[in-house]
Image: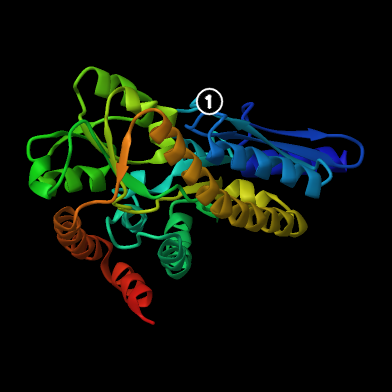
């Protein structure tokens, strides 16, 4: 009876009345299952990293904690994942962090354009910001476990782009406040489009251009709708594996330490895999007839001006914490 009472307390503490998180008691232990939603398809390298992380956690805990991935928006759509984790409807989820900058301004750092344009720069920016971002997420009941990185974001376009002026009036796929603002500063027309809707948006003329990674371009077979991909490397955004704070606190300290170790290993692995995948995406796009090119000097100069303006705007929105992050990033 003692074990069963303990499990009921754990269930109350972690909000597991439904099927999203199940504690199964037996005579000696309670095996915990966490359902993990992701918006990205199972074949995507980020989703594969999530699945590998879940398998590693199960192995390291001898099955005491199992994480079941639900890719492709099959459990929750991308826009609902953070809320679902926060409210305890699921204990864990993978979500694109920059999409929630209105709720947590520091998360907008991930999509400040032309601030960190290489893996090394992106890693430095992450290292100087992750404590502050983690603290901001804790304030809304979430714990950040690790952050998989996406490939550099390039400019896809139906037409050739030589200067920022060439973007004037172009319908530009936007998915958050940052990409909307970027479109405005380029003179483009932002059109709200989720990742799963990109092909339809381009095929129907709703979108004519976008900032996205080669991963998204390949996933959506963008070569059917756009001819050009410019390696402007606007940013290297991150998804975040986030855990409901109550669910995390319900784990014993040894399990928390084990999950933290698995998260660190998963993060290191996926950052390395990103570069391998990016090379493959570019090769696939080239094989399918896309023109991949560096931006012209004029285009890059114009984009850098926009980046400087948006960095200043982000600092204003993020306050002292944001200013401290940028200062630390630029130091040394």
Q: Is residue 80 above or below residue 106?
A: above
- Relative to 13, 7 lies left or right: right
SS label for mark 1: loop
Return the x and y of residue 138 as percentages of the image width and height.
48, 57
The residue closer to the viewer here, 41 or 109, is 41
Q: Position of residue 185 (x, y in %)?
A: 12, 49
Task: Tell me where residue 114 sits by quadrant.
Answer: bottom left
As drawn, is 202 to the left or to the right of 165? right
- In the current view of this chain or complex, which residue is farthest to the top? 204
Q: Spot the residue most to the bottom.
A: 332
Residue 283 appearing in the image: yes
Residue 52: quarter of image: top right
Look at mark 1 in the image and give the residue it sits on. Answer: 75
Q: Nearer the viewer, residue 41 or 9?
A: 41
Q: Residue at x 26, y 19 (%)?
A: 203
Q: Residue furthest right?
A: 27
Q: Nearer the viewer, residue 229 or 97?
A: 229
Asked if residue 130 lies left or right of residue 62, the reply is left
> At which x and y percent is residue 194?
33, 30
Rendered-image quadrant of the N terminus: top right
The residue positioned 41% from the left and 65% from the top of the image is: 121
- On the image, the x and y values in percent for residue 275 come to 51, 51
User: What residue is shown at x 70% (from left), y 51% (from top)?
Assistant: 251
């Amino acid at each position: 009876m003692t074990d069963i009472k303990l499990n009921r307390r754990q269930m109350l503490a972690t909000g597991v009345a439904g099927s999203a998180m199940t504690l199964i008691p037996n005579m000696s232990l309670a095996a915990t299952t966490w359902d993990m939603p992701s918006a990205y398809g199972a074949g995507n390298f980020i989703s594969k990293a999530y699945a590998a992380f879940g398998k590693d956690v199960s192995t390291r805990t001898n099955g005491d904690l199992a994480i079941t991935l639900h890719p492709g928006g099959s459990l929750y759509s991308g826009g609902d994942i953070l809320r679902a984790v926060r409210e305890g409807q699921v204990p864990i989820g993978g979500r694109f962090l920059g999409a929630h900058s209105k709720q947590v301004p520091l998360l907008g750092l991930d999509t400040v354009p032309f601030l960190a344009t290489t893996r090394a720069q992106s890693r430095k920016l992450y290292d100087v910001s992750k404590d502050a971002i983690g603290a901001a997420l804790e304030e809304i009941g979430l714990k950040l476990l690790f952050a998989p990185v996406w490939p550099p974001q390039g400019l896809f376009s139906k037409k050739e782009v030589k200067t920022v002026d060439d973007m004037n009036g172009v319908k530009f796929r936007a998915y958050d406040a940052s990409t909307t603002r970027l479109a405005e500063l380029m003179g483009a027309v932002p059109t709200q489009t989720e990742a799963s809707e990109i092909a339809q948006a381009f095929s129907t003329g709703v979108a004519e251009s976008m900032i996205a990674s080669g991963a998204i371009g390949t996933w959506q077979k963008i070569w059917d709708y756009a001819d050009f991909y410019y390696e402007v490397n606007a940013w290297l955004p991150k998804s975040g594996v986030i855990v409901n704070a109550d669910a995390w606190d319900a784990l014993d300290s040894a399990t928390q330490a084990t999950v933290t170790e698995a998260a660190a290993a998963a993060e290191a692995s996926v950052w390395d895999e990103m570069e391998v995948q990016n090379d493959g995406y570019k090769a696939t796009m080239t094989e399918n007839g896309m023109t991949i090119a560096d931006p012209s000097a004029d285009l890059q100069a114009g984009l850098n001006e926009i980046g400087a303006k948006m960095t200043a705007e982000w600092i204003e929105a993020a306050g002292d914490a944001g200013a401290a992050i940028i200062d630390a990033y630029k130091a040394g």
